[in-house]
Structure formats: structure tokens, C-alpha cells
Image (cartoon, rainbow, N blue to C red):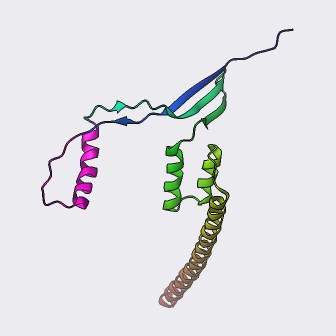
Amino acid sequence: MKLATKKIRVELGQDTPAYASFELTVGADLTDADIINLVKEQAEEQAGDLVFEPSYDLSGLRVVSATHANGDTIVEDLPIDPSHEDIGIVAMDVLKGTVAPNQLIMEAERQGVSVRPEVVEMFKRFSLAYEAEKREMVEMFKRFSLAYEAEKREREAEKRSRTQKIRG
């Protein structure tokens, strides 16, 4: 008896860094902070004219996608190796306050990175504090909005009252 089979297309990707360099001539009196600002400015301008040489260290292996023959997606962005870039992006989002701190632990677990229990506990506490502060800010905004709406209704009522007095 022959088993039924089907074809699955699997696309792989890797985080392959690429490097290029350029030289700057700067004034001897510039501070390190001045040079950093100049480097950042020039990096954007120079990058388009440079040839970046890839460094094939073959890190961050991931399944970009796996699809059925008809094109239906089975899975996308499935890490095989830990990706420091993905974790770094989540860390930046945590630092910006756009995602809860526990998202960093969740991303690490998604990638199979072993996280010490005390670190997980620290992030849980951090996330609880973050969520509590977020709720407090939402409540403060609600109170502000209610006060603003009440003041707006009061102004509109005063305006109607003045209009009625003028019309007599």
C-alpha cells in the first residue's frame, strides 16, 4: 500500500551580516560625541555608494515560510537558530515602551533560548509594574477626557445661553 504524499515548499533564510567601510577626515579638535554625530550623518550618505561584502557566518537559520503546493501558508518566520536580531528588536520595543517587558521573555522562549528562572521572574514583576502604570495612565486619561467633555458641554451651554439672551 502506497502512502499519499504532497509537496511542501520550504524557504530558508539566514541572518548574514555584510560589511563595508569608508574613511572620514575630521578636525583634530572634535570631541568623540561630535565624531559620533558626524559618523551617523555620513553613514547614511555613504551607504548607498558602498559595496557591502557579506560575511557568511551562517547564523540565525530560520524557515522563512513553508507552503502547500497551492500556495497556502503552513508557517512563516519559524526560527531554527536563535536570532539575536529578533530578540534585539523586541528589546528595543520594550525600552521604547511600545510592548510589555514580558514580550522579551516570550520571544526568547519562542526561539528556544534558555532563560534562567530568576530572569523570568524579574521580567514578570517588571511587566506587572508596566501594566499597572499603563492602567493608571489610561484611567488618568479617562478622567481628563470626562473633565474635558464636561467643560466643553458647559461652554456650549453658556454659548447657547448668550445666544438666547442676544436674540431676546
Residue at the spot 29% in from the left edge and 45% down from the top edge:
44
Residue at the spot 56% in from the left edge and 78% down from the top edge:
144
Q: Is residue 47 above or below residue 97?
A: above
* Span shown in magenta: 22-48
Name the residue at the top extreme: 1
Foreground of the two, 98 or 146: 98
Dividing the picture into quadrants, the one containing residue 150 is: bottom right
Residue at the spot 64% in from the left edge and 55% down from the top edge:
116
Q: Is residue 88 left or right of residue 52?
A: right
Dividing the picture into quadrants, the one containing residue 137 is: bottom right
Q: Is residue 82 left or right of residue 72?
A: left
Q: Position of residue 98 (x, y in %)?
A: 53, 59
Q: Quadrant of the N terminus?
A: top right
Q: Position of residue 62 (x, y in %)?
A: 57, 33
Q: Position of residue 118 (x, y in %)?
A: 65, 61
Foreground of the two, 7 or 52: 52
Give the number of callouts.
Answer: 0
Foreground of the two, 29 or 97: 29
Q: Based on the picture, tell me whether residue 60 belongs to the magenta stretch.
A: no
Q: Position of residue 128 (x, y in %)?
A: 65, 68
Residue at the spot 60% in from the left edge and 69% down from the top edge:
134
Q: Based on the picture, tell me whether residue 26 belongs to the magenta stretch.
A: yes
Q: Is residue 150 above or below residue 3?
A: below
Name the residue at the right extreme: 1
